[in-house]
Amino acid sequence: MTVTVRRYQPSDLGQVLDLWDRAGAMPIGADGLTVDQALDLMSSAESVSVVAESDGRVVGTAIGATVGVVGWLCRLVTVPDDDPSAGTVQRLVDDVEAKFSERQVRKIVTVVSGSGPVHIDLGRRGYAESDGGVFLERELAVAQVAPSTLAELGGRMIGPGLWDELKGMDQVKEIIERRVILPIAQPEVAARHAVAAPRAVVLFGPPGTGKTTFAKGIASRLEWPSIEIQPGQLAGEGPERQATYLAKTFDRILELPSAVVFVDEVEDLASIRGAERKVTPSVANEFLKQIPRFRDVTHHLLVCATNWIGRLDPAFLRPGRFDYVLPVGPPDAEARRAIWQRYVDEITDEPVDVGALVRASERFTPADIEFAARKAAQRAFERELFEGERTRSTTAEFLWAVKRTRPTLTQEIIDDLQEDIRRFARD
Ligand SMILES: Nc1ncnc2c1ncn2[C@@H]1O[C@H](COP(=O)(O)OP(=O)(O)O)[C@@H](O)[C@H]1O
Ligand SMILES: [Mg+2]
């Protein structure tokens, strides 16, 4: 039985899929690739993909992809009944290695499963397990496919850690998790209970409580790109063009496979008093017209945030537009403790009485805590430079900084928030 190796052709597709299926590479291979991903790679112009053929039958595949001096060898698969004496693996690897050499590759990386014949063949050729390393992988959201549109819209992917960086605020987190994230992340369960994925939500609360961070955290949790629309920026477009510009922006956003669209300071767009808006009435109307479009598409979520919910046009907030209107209130003692702890851990290794900081910062928002923590760090830094004292921040520096930080929250703001929650909140 002779085996020949040649370039992969689209007409091989059926046989290749059949082979991968029989070789246990479906739905996911040892290389961690799904069928779609492997096929994408196989047909991409830059990769080298070869098949081994015997008696007109595809009996093996190998995909090679180069990045600089590194060559990735994937989908090295042969039929389960492959006769070792036929040397199928050898031939596939010979061919891909030759193509790698032409491209100046100096190191080849590959993943194989278990200790089957492929493993043994590769071992004979000098491939060795990497020392102490493990194979890690992470799926990226589909939207990565359209990076240029995304970049033009000022959108970006937010790292997976942001949600966890939001410390404390467990109540807000839990409500957002349950009402907003899970119906999107668990579509089958949601459908079984006729729970619809939310399309648009409003976050409100005093400045610095974390609304912006929560909006980005949602994008990070969903692994959707985040696109921010700043009403203030529209103002730069000139009065006649603002509405058209906004409509065009939404057209492009809705063409993306997925997105969290974040409109911060939405009162600039939808304030009840025209004088408080930063845009012309036609823009405010255009924005209202765009919201229902979110209701018709999946994988798009509109998040609006405001410090002044009472200033919004009541018509703007009506239930048909927004699924939820959620308060992001001041941090309670437990939340302040968690937020302090985060910054204390970052800034110092000296023992710090976090309880004292929590008590001293009653009217602080998370942003105030962050500000005070940075101030304490700055003080210790200056001490080392100018007084030669090398200790990092201690409780004393933190308390010193707290005293010099004006809390955002006042009794009036807290009372107003309670009233706003009573009048506007919908969770
Ligand atoms: N729960 C939290 N834990 C830690 N830091 C927080 C938290 N909430 C907010 N912050 C920090 O406080 C600052 C202000 O938050 P931000 O989201 O901009 O507030 P808002 O949009 O409500 O004005 C940011 O630097 C953010 O990192
Ligand atoms: Mg904000």
Image: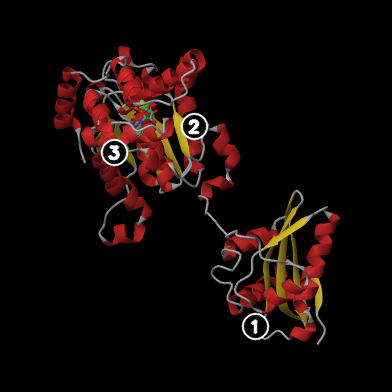
- Number of residues whose C-alpha sits closer than 10 Å to that of mark 2, classed few (under 14), some (14–19) or many (20 or more): some
- Between the residue at mark 2 and the residue at mark 3, the CA separation in whole angstroms equals 35 Å
Nearer-N-terminus badge (1/2)? 1
Q: Is residue 73 left or right of residue 427?
A: right
State yes or no: Cβ of the residue under disc 3 lies below 8 Å from any atom of ligand 1: yes
Identity of the amino acid at label 3?
Gly
Nearer-N-terminus badge (3/1)? 1
* Residue occupying the point 49% across, 20% down: 241
Q: Which residue is mark 2?
A: 249
Q: Ligand 2 shows up in which quadrant of the image?
A: top left
Of the pair 167 and 222, the residue shown nearer to us: 167
- CB under 8 Å between callouts 1 and 2? no
Identity of the amino acid at label 1?
Pro
- The quadrant holding residue 72 is bottom right
State yes or no: Cβ of the residue under disc 2 lies below 8 Å from any atom of ligand 2: no
- In front: label 1 or label 2: 1
Q: Is residue 340 left or right of residue 57?
A: left
- The quadrant holding residue 213 is top left
* Residue occupying the point 19% across, 26% down: 417
- In front: label 2 or label 3: 3
- Between the residue at mark 1 and the residue at mark 2, the CA separation in whole angstroms equals 52 Å
Q: Which residue is mark 1?
A: 80
Q: Is residue 4 left or right of residue 335?
A: right
Identity of the amino acid at label 2?
Thr
- In front: label 3 or label 1: 3
- Number of residues whose C-alpha sits closer than 10 Å to that of mark 1, classed few (under 14), some (14–19) or many (20 or more): some
Nearer-N-terminus badge (2/3)? 3
Q: Which residue is mark 3?
A: 168
Of the pair 424 and 68, the residue shown nearer to us: 68
